């Protein structure tokens, strides 16, 4: 055995050399080939102020780039792939709309957007590599991603250093609290989801003269579930509602009986619940079986209860349940209806959370690019000019497409990069023609519908 | 064959150093390839460190990320909570990780847990650490301060991150080198080949297995912080069972006890995995994982003794 290893050590030296040379050669080949033939003219990728304009500028007679690369990093494999793939589809649709229907970026001579997508992989490491590759290969001035908070923070390490705008679709609050300069987020952050669920319940209680004094908060204990719940708890406390209990559990819980028994003894007025998917089904069924009565059961965090799969699995156990969403596919603005129809035609399904956030985030990028072209005609893609353009945006339903796609109809960035007018749409499971259907009920109800509140069959106990 | 003991390995280390020094030059300042090189080399150094316990001492340890994570989190927390710069902190991290390894190793080896049971125990360790750190840290992401500088081992240039990872690789290689050539190395091999026989000839197998565990966990603990620097944030998810398993897989594919095989397998397969992710990830999602799995299976079927024996065969055929 000892001899064998010696033989290995001498011979393997040569092998190491061969392999490393091969890898290096392959690396150089890939580096020079790049992803697209037109992107290799400026190899100085580590420069702190990257030349973000596409190199084809030189061949163009105008001062504007003929195309602008937009990076997208999403989890296309692994457990978050469902969301990432939908986001990728949405991004491609919006880019096509911008290029074909809106005539590209008009303030930059009609420059077309080119979407370049990378899989975030399964670790922060790979998400960082993905972001770095987009910058090194395409010199993207703007990037979107990456749904998962820890992937996004790994991306931000790259985008901040290279002064690339990161428009994130990850909702966890802390991402915009790190003092990062180039991060923007249109979507409502996770605590805004929790807050919206409470605001909705209190608003409806006021309208229906229902007295609500106590609440139970129940959430799956991931970083997302926890931050959504924190938003709800804060809003409950500041409205003087007593929190009887705040219960957390792992999202892959298989037996919810102890939780139900605990809730039973509390006799609270409302339940604010932040589920994932399967746990939501289990909870709804167990609550139905136990005969627990609440004035209202409101979900938050855009997962579970009101999505088609959960409704299918839980049946009428989720009737009258609500959940908060970052996107409202039923919003009756012209462009929202148009985008939803186009998405349905192209992909044969309704756009949900993952697609919706990309709709308005990417459309906001479009508005910012238009603005940058007007504000800084000589160098619109300079990172600080872009940043200034994003910060100067004040979008509403009348002056922009982006705002028409957003639940609050209003987009304006604060100094931390978060939208100052976050809003979520609330969907409720109702019986429509005998079928369990999710309908938008708040802040503006879908035409012909209104929120059913309090839960039928509930009576105030004394 | 014996002549190679004195000349071969020293030459080998020199060649490794030269190659590691050439790589950044070959990448021509492409930041993506520099970052990739840093992650690949860091991964390789973990595999080389694993070789001490898995390759020489023959203990199928699947808990690499448990020790790596503990070291990394301790270093990061020492910086953020106590202001101790990571340049010092990494050694404390390594020491804490080694201490924990010893505390676990003493009863483990005392009660003769070995082979598959040792593998299961160490795999469970990652899950246990995952749960404990979740209780202590909550589900949140923790971000390193934006400060850069040598004492913080944080830089704006990937080349320096790469250089640190490369020095870890060289250090891990040297530790392997000295272990292999020492009395301890022979004891390790005796334990790997036949633990009972090793005990019969008077080797204190418990103690030497503990030494192997100590070296391995200390090295991984020191490397943990650089892993966090590359990932940019940390949470309880650093204790990742499947990533931990991949360290042992690379060591096995490379050939047990062969440092060179481990370096080759980890570098080639990790780069290949990244190439697949990047090339096919957006057009054919999941194909990277499929191809990656296929490569593993092929090597498993045709070269179960690892890459090192393949190289041997090829060289013999030529000779």
Image (cartoon, rainbow, N blue to C red):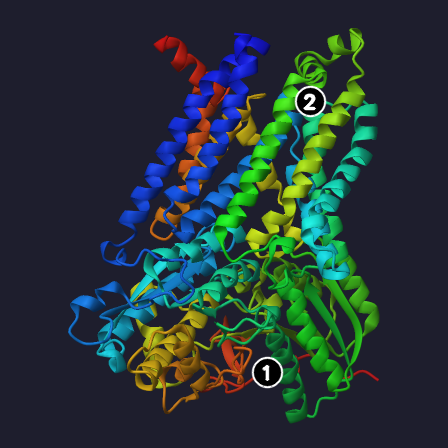
Q: Position of residue A233 (x, y in %)?
A: 72, 76
- Tell me if residue B39 comes above or below residue B53 in the rendering: below
Closer to the eye: label 1 or 2:
2
Label 1 to label 2, Cα distance in Å?
Answer: 61 Å
- Tell me if residue B35 comes above or below residue A270 in the rendering: above
Q: Which mark is residue A452?
A: 1
Report in which chain the residue with disc 1 lies: A
Mark 2 surroundings within 10 Å by alpha-carbon count, few (fewer than 14), some (14 through 19), many (20 or more): few
Q: Secondary structure at mark 2?
A: helix
Mark 1 surroundings within 10 Å by alpha-carbon count, few (fewer than 14), some (14 through 19), many (20 or more): some
Residue placed at 37% from the left, 92% from the top? A398
For the N terminus of chain A, the quadrant is: top right
- Tell me if residue B195 comes above or below residue A27 in the rendering: above
- Tell me if residue B179 comes above or below residue A340 in the rendering: above
Q: Which mark is residue A240?
A: none
Can you identify the residue that label 2 sits on?
A: B115
């Amino acid at each position: 055995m000892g001899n064998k290893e010696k033989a290995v050590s001498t011979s393997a030296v040569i092998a190491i050399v061969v392999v490393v040379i091969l890898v290096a050669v392959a690396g150089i080949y890939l580096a020079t080939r790049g992803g697209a033939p037109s992107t290799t003219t400026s190899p100085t990728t580590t420069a702190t102020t990257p030349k973000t304009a596409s190199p084809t500028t030189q061949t163009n007679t105008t001062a504007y780039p003929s195309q602008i690369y937009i990076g997208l990093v999403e989890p296309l494999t692994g457990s978050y792939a469902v969301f990432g793939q939908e986001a990728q589809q949405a991004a491609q649709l919006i880019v096509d709309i911008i290029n074909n229907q809106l005539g590209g970026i008009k303030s930059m001579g009609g420059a077309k957007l080119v979407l370049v997508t990378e899989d975030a992989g399964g670790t922060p490491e790979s998400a960082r590599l993905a972001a770095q590759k987009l910058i090194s290969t395409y010199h993207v001035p703007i990037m979107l991603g990456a749904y998962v908070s820890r992937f996004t923070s790994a991306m931000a390490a790259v985008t901040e250093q290279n002064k690339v705008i990161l428009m994130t679709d990850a909702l966890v609050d802390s991402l915009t609290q790190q003092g990062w300069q180039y991060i923007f987020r249109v979507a409502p952050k996770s605590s805004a989801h929790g807050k919206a669920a409470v605001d909705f319940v209190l608003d409806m209680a006021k309208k229906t003269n229902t007295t609500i004094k106590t609440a139970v908060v129940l959430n799956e204990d991931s970083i997302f579930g926890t931050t959504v719940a924190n938003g709800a708890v804060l809003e409950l406390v500041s409205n003087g509602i007593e929190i009887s209990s705040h219960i957390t559990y792992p999202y892959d819980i298989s037996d919810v009986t102890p939780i139900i028994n605990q809730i039973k003894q509390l006799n609270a007025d409302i339940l604010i619940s932040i589920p994932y998917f399967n746990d939501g089904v289990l909870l709804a069924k167990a609550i139905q079986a136990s005969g627990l009565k609440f004035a209202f059961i409101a979900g938050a965090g855009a997962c579970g209860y009101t999505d088609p799969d959960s409704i299918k699995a839980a049946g009428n156990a989720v009737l009258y349940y609500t959940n908060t969403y970052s996107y409202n596919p039923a919003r009756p603005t012209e462009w929202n209806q148009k985008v939803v129809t186009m998405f349905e035609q192209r992909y044969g399904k309704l756009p949900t959370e993952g697609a919706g956030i990309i709709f308005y985030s990417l459309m906001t990028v479009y508005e910012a690019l238009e603005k940058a072209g007007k504000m800084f005609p000589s160098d619109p893609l300079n990172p600080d000019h872009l940043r200034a353009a994003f910060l100067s945006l004040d979008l509403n339903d009348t002056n922009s497409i982006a705002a028409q796609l957003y639940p609050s109809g209003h987009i304006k960035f604060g100094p931390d990069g978060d939208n100052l007018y976050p809003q979520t749409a609330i969907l409720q499971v109702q019986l429509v023609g005998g079928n369990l259907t999710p309908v938008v009920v708040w802040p503006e109800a879908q035409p012909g519908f209104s929120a059913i509140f309090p839960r039928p069959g509930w009576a105030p106990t004394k | 064959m014996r002549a190679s003991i004195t000349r071969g390995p020293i030459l080998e280390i020199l060649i490794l150093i030269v190659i590691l020094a050439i790589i950044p030059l070959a990448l021509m300042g492409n930041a993506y390839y520099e970052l990739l090189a840093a992650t690949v080399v860091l991964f390789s150094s973990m595999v080389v460190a694993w070789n001490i316990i898995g390759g020489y001492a023959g203990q199928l340890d699947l808990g690499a990320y448990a020790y790596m994570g503990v070291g990394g989190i301790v270093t990061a927390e020492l910086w953020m909570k106590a202001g101790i710069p990571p340049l010092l902190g990494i050694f404390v991290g390594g020491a804490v990780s080694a201490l924990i390894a010893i505390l676990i190793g003493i009863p483990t080896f005392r009660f003769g847990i070995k082979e598959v049971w040792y593998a299961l125990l160490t795999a469970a360790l990652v899950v246990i650490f995952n749960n404990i750190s979740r209780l202590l840290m909550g589900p949140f992401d923790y971000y390193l301060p934006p400060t850069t500088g040598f004492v913080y081992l944080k830089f704006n240039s990937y080349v320096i991150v790469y250089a640190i990872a490369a020095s870890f690789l060289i250090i891990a290689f040297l530790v392997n080198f000295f272990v292999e050539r020492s009395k301890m190395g022979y004891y390790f091999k005796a334990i790997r080949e036949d633990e009972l026989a090793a005990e019969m000839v008077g080797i204190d197998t418990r103690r030497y297995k503990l030494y192997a565990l100590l070296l391995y966990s200390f090295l991984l603990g020191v490397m943990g912080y650089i892993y966090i620097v590359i990932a940019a944030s940390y949470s309880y998810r650093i204790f990742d069972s499947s990533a931990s398993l991949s360290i042992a897989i690379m060591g096995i594919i490379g050939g047990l006890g062969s440092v060179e095989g481990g370096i080759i397998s980890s570098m080639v397969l990790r780069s290949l995995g990244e190439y697949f992710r990047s090339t096919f990830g957006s057009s054919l999602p999941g194909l990277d994982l499929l191809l990656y799995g296929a490569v593993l299976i092929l090597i498993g079927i045709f070269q179960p003794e690892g890459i090192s024996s393949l190289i041997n065969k090829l060289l013999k055929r030529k000779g």
